[in-house]
Image: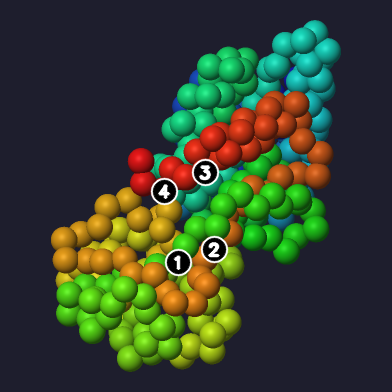
Amino acid sequence: MSLVKYEILNKVAEVHSFTKAAEALGLTQSAISHAISSLEKEFGFSLIHRSRNGVKLTEEGKSMLISMRRVLLADELLHQEAANILGVTKGKVRIGLISSISTKWMPNLIQIMEKSYPGITIELREGDYYEIEQWLINGEIDCGFLNRTNSKQFNFMPLKRDPLLCVVSKKSKLYEKEAIDIKDIEDEPIIMPSYKGTNDVLMLFEQYNVKPHIRFELFDEIGILSMVHHELGISILPQLGITQLPKNVRLVPFKHESFRTIGLSTKQSLSPAAKRFVEELKHWLIENEDNLVFE
């Protein structure tokens, strides 16, 4: 059946490997290869390019996969709607999330969903803002946690203002301050968070016309905290992204308003299963409004 073949190509494109796709789908590698070859024969052109570095889609394959994902989504929605008519909530919700959400929010939300809707399967993909937005555009996920989006293809639901805090070691003259003037950081070496997509720290600098002295750029918050701990500079991080502070490192707020807005970006039309997740997310946020960062 073509839907099965579409699902196989989708998984191969996701993991860039026949072997990993076979493991994920519970099939043999020869079955994966046969399905891809069958699709290529049916369409009359190559869908993938094999190399020592793995498997990549051809340009034709990328174009066809977009249409295949639409077909797979339509099939999923059809079955979810049928279950909904029967009064049974079933289906799958594919969620893109940043690391701070996966550690602070999702464990509780998954427990709630499993208890309330055992017929709904949750699939998680962790990435940065840019990757999550691309997954949404390509139809690889149903919803994703972002700081903002300019795309008119999605609905963006703001969820929480997450304070941006200055991370300082004892070596910094800012260590003893109760609050920091944003301009004061111009005299300090900065360990800059290098997020792809919309970078909230860069936007903060632009908003207050700050010209930072950037010493290093790192993506991982743990690496940034380690650099600050070893007195190599200061940094600015969102409160939700900080799990544990190293010894002799402080978080100091700014005198100016500084925060990132965490929100959920969703497709314009949500499946019944995705709607249930959004409803539970909203309810959980209201119940835990005062206890969302450090538990």
Of the two numbered discs 3 and 1 on the same chain, state the one appearing first in sequence: 1
- Which residue is more in the foreground, 184 or 97? 184
Amino acid on which the number 2 mark rests in the picture: Arg
Give the class, few, some or many, for how many residues have Cα within 10 Å of label 4's Cα (few <14, many ≥20): some
Query: Closer to us: mark 3 or mark 2?
Result: 3
Query: What residue is pinned by disc 2?
Result: 260
Amino acid on which the number 4 mark rests in the picture: Val
Is residue 28 in sight in this rendering? no
Q: Position of residue 178 (x, y in %)?
A: 31, 73
Q: Kindly identify which numbered label has been placed on residue 164.
A: 1
Is residue 91 in sight in this rendering? yes
Query: What residue is pinned by disc 3?
Result: 289
Amino acid on which the number 1 mark rests in the picture: Leu
**Which quadrant holds the C terminus?**
top left
Q: Is residue 144 above or below residue 287?
A: below
Of the two numbered discs 2 and 1 on the same chain, state the one appearing first in sequence: 1
Q: Name the residue: 41% across, 83% down.
A: 181
Q: Name the residue: 75% across, 60% down.
A: 151
Q: Position of residue 129 (x, y in %)?
A: 56, 58
